[in-house]
Image: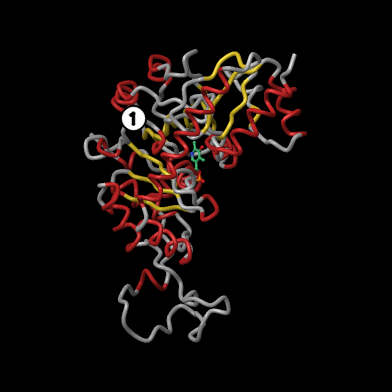
Amino acid sequence: MFDLSSLVRPHILQLKPYASARDEYTGREGIFLDANENPFQSVAGGAYNRYPDPLQRTLKARIAALKQVAAERIFLGNGSDEPIDLLIRAFCEPGRDHIMLLPPTYGMYQVSADINRVETVPIPLTRDFQLDTEEIIASSRPATKLIFICSPNNPTANCMRQSDISLILRHAPGLVVVDEAYIDFAPDQTLTHWLETHPNLVILQTFSKAWGMAALRLGMGFAHPEVIAVLNKIKPPYNLSGLTQEVALEALDHADTKDLLVHNILEGRAWLTQQLETLPAVQQVFPSDANFILARITDADTVYHRLTDRQIIVRNRSRVILCEDCLRITVGTPLENEALIQALRAVTQP
Ligand SMILES: *Cc1c(COP(=O)(O)O)cnc(C)c1O
């Protein structure tokens, strides 16, 4: 019952995509005089004089093996922000379609929609930061092309109940995008094993957090092969640099390092949580499934500025819906975490 062509914007369905030199001839052997490259070398050193693989086949094969997801179900982007933007551009006709957001949540969904002049329908989370499934389903229209669910959610740090996500998947008129940027820090499993049975599911992950590669800009989208084909059709031809692909391949040889980093961050999270709970000014430390902690602190605005004065920068979320008086604190190194707690103790001294 999955008819993707009824969801894609008509002009995108009809679009004749740009065919790069590397699309037209995919062989690896030969004298390549087709892409106006410098035949000698790169001034930067390294083999950067040739355009990279537009479909990143080598890298996708490695990610497919690691994630147990077929390569044809994988999209790689310049950060997750790229697939977020491409999804909105491919599926939402400005003035007609909209995306559904579940605030408080990651700001890029709204910004990407705004850039594309696509309307957003906000359905706030419940008081305990879970999905208001009834309201989400009741408010869905054929024009609701995308529903963005962030799990673990930024900034509330908790996972959404998988039974609720499943219910939404079964009722959604369009695609359901589950942003798993923080999944490596969560006790819950990724939902990638749902892809085969849920053609309207899109999962986003990133190398920016657990893998510690934020500067490289490498995001992953997992979805039905037809959805991936639509994204490939409209992406900039060489959206991932050769350098990014090279470094990512190197990193994939060291997944154990990622696991160790995650382990250390989880220890830091437990320590920070316990320390924060001892501070009188801290009213509530919300349980975290991510690499950051949301805490409700008396007079959070003032505390935020006093921390900044001491060159300790956290995220002030106190003006965000359901997050009144809340600061979002990224788990740092043990020394950074200690400095934060000391500073918090000093600036909240009665
Ligand atoms: C950090 C973050 C991302 C990652 O974005 P990149 O563009 O891959 O760096 C995606 N989603 C959420 C919710 C995030 O907090």
Quarter containing the C terminus: top right
Name the residue beneath numbered marker 1.
188
Question: Along the line of sight, which residue is nearer the eye, 234 or 176?
Answer: 176
Q: Residue at the location (49% across, 47% down)?
A: 208
In terms of secondary structure, where does tag 1 sit? loop
Quarter containing the N terminus: top left
Rendered location of residue 55, percent (x, y)? 37, 61
Rendered location of residue 229, percent (x, y)? 34, 52
Q: Residue at the location (45% across, 52% down)?
A: 77
The answer to whether one can see residue 16 in this image is no
User: Image quadrant of residue 337?
Assistant: top right
Question: Along the line of sight, which residue is nearer the eye, 188 or 200?
Answer: 188
User: Image quadrant of residue 223?
Assistant: top left
Q: Residue at the location (66% across, 22% down)?
A: 319
Q: Crowding at label 1, few (<14), some or many (≥20) Cα neighbours within 10 Å?
A: some
Type of colouring: secondary structure
The answer to whether residue 235 is left or right of residue 173 is right
Q: Residue at the location (46% across, 77% down)?
A: 35
